[in-house]
Amino acid sequence: MATVSFVYEPNLGPLNHALKAVGLGRFAQAWLGQESTAVSAIIAMSQWQGFGYSTLLFAVAIQRIPSEIYGAAAIDGVGPIRRFVHVTVPLVREMTGLMAIVTISGAFQVFNEVMVMTAGGPNNSTQVLGTWLYRSGFVRNNFGYAAAVATVLFVITLGIAVAQLWVTRRRRVEW
């Protein structure tokens, strides 16, 4: 992840260099050094980090759909867009629900990205529950408070997972 910090480096980083090269130099800035852009930079890096995993899981889910279903839809005169909307999307609904749970739970449990790139700064603008828990327990030696933060983190994550499972509880589509 130190490599990603280099991407955002204001003077030598390739992001600002690329912006200047295409004539958008006015947008070049200290991405991790400003309160207004630090969170967005970490979110962008985190999403890019998980993009391959998500893509792979969706590719596997799509490959599991029998080609006969697509063939039947084509015979019925269904175009590619309607085929995607009415065949592919419903048949990968389970994977979509799983990915939503994993992504949202991961967002609440983010720690490494923030700790390595900004350590919660600048001015606590990138502070998340994980770094708050770490600082409370291991920096300030307030383990009771850190345990309370961990419990809140667990309850929030569990609540979101249960809510998402309830929303996506429809019966499984069989083929």
Image (spheres, helix red, strand yellow):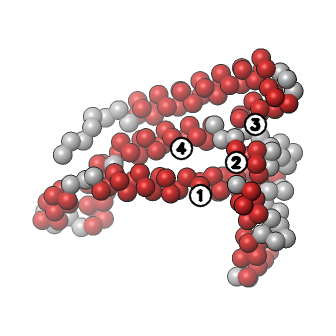
Image x and y of residue 150, in percent: 68, 25
Q: Which amino acid type corresponds to the residue marked 2 in the rendered image?
A: Glu
Residue drawn at point x = 34 percent, y = 51 percent = 61
Q: Tell me which label, 2 or 4, sits earlier in the chain.
A: 4
- Residue that mark 3 sits on: 131
| Quadrant of the snapshot with the N terminus | bottom right
- Residue that mark 1 sits on: 48
Task: Choose between 39 and 81: the one closer to the eye.
Answer: 39
Q: Is residue 37 visible?
A: no
Under circle 2, the secondary element is helix
Judge the density around disc 2: few (<14), some (14-19), many (≥20) Cα neighbours within 10 Å. Answer: some
Mark 1 near mark 2, Cβ–Cβ under 8 Å? no
For residue 113, the mark is 2
> Is residue 57 found left or right of 67 in the rendered image?
right
Q: Tell me which label, 3 or 2, sits earlier in the chain.
A: 2
Judge the density around disc 1: few (<14), some (14-19), many (≥20) Cα neighbours within 10 Å. Answer: few
How far apart in space, not on screen, are marks 2 and 4 (Cα)? Answer: 15 Å
Q: Which amino acid type corresponds to the residue marked 4 in the rendered image?
A: Thr
Mark 3 near mark 2, Cβ–Cβ under 8 Å? no
Q: Is residue 71 visible?
A: yes
Task: Choose between 46 and 123: the one closer to the eye.
Answer: 46
Residue drawn at point x = 77 percent, y = 69 percent = 13
How far apart in space, not on screen, are marks 1 and 4 (Cα)? Answer: 12 Å
How far apart in space, not on screen, are marks 1 and 2 (Cα)? Answer: 12 Å
Q: Which quarter of the picture shows residue 134? A: top right
Residue drawn at point x = 46 percent, y = 44 percent = 99
Residue drawn at point x = 55 percent, y = 52 percent = 50
Under circle 3, the secondary element is helix
How far apart in space, not on screen, are marks 3 and 2 (Cα)? Answer: 10 Å
- Residue that mark 4 sits on: 103
